[in-house]
């Protein structure tokens, strides 16, 4: 089946438009780096003695580092309610994620993410 390359798909959920989404297969502890219109995001997975959680730190101008702690569940865990991250062109940038650990020894995981713009 041929698809016309001029066809554009627009997905909107509760007044938020999907910018991008994807699934990454990761191994090890290398950070994930993403850039949206000059806003840079760094995602890292870390372990400590606490509960599963995430923290955000502005490490320099226009750079936000999100650390995901103790995401060790093989069935997955994350935040499906949109998290407000930034403002782009007077619209709020939202983020959701879900991570599943596949192999604890190699820190192999599946990382699902979505970015939305809206209100």
Image (cartoon, rainbow, N blue to C red):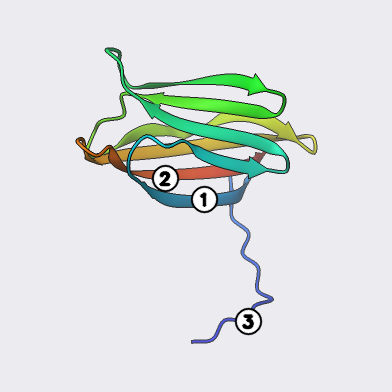
Q: Residue at x 19, y 36 (%)?
A: 105
Residue 14 in view (yes/no): no
Of badges 2 and 3, the one in the foreground is: 2
Q: In this view, does 105 lie to the left or right of 70?
A: left
- Distance CA(mark 2)–CA(mark 1): 8 Å
Choose the circle earlier in sequence order: 1 or 3.
3
Decide which of tag 2 and tag 1 comes sooner along the chain: 1
Q: At which x and y percent is residue 86?
A: 67, 29
- Is there CB contact under 8 Å for labels 2 and 3? no
**Residue in the foreground of this view, choosing between 102 and 12:** 102
Instruction: Name the residue that disc number 2 marks.
Output: 112
The number of discs equals 3
Q: Position of residue 83 (x, y in %)?
A: 54, 29
Classify the position of the C terminus by image quarter. top right
Residue at x 60%, y 27% (from the top left corner): 64
Q: How far apart are marks 2 and 3 (CA)?
A: 28 Å
The answer to whether the residues at label 2 and label 1 have Cβ atoms under 8 Å apart is: yes
| Secondary element type, mark 1 | strand
Which residue is found at the position 47% from the left and 52% from the top?
A: 22
Q: Are marks 1 and 3 in contact (CB under 8 Å)?
A: no
Mark 1 — residue? 21
* Drawn side of residue 101 relative to residue 87, left or right: left
Q: Where is residue 61 in the image (x, y as percent from the top left)?
A: 72, 24
Task: Classify 10 Å Cα crowding around label 2: few (below 14), some (14-19), many (20 and above).
Answer: some
Q: Is residue 14 above or below residue 59?
A: below
Q: Name the residue under label 3.
A: 4
Q: Is 22 situated above or below 51?
A: below
> Which element carries disc 2, helix, strand or loop?
strand
Identified at 26% across, 30% down, the residue is 72
Q: How far apart are marks 1 and 3 (CA)?
A: 22 Å
């Amino acid at each position: 089946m041929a698809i016309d390359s001029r066809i554009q798909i627009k997905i909107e959920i509760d007044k938020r438009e999907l910018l991008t989404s994807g699934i990454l297969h990761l191994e090890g502890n290398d950070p994930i780096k993403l850039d949206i219109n000059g806003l840079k995001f760094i995602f890292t997975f870390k372990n400590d003695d606490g509960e599963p959680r995430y923290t955000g730190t502005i490490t320099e101008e226009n750079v936000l580092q999100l650390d995901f702690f103790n995401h060790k569940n093989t069935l997955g865990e994350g935040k499906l309610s949109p998290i407000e991250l930034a403002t782009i062109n007077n619209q709020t940038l939202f983020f959701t994620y879900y991570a599943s650990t596949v192999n604890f020894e190699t820190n192999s995981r599946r990382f699902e993410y979505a970015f939305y713009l809206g209100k």
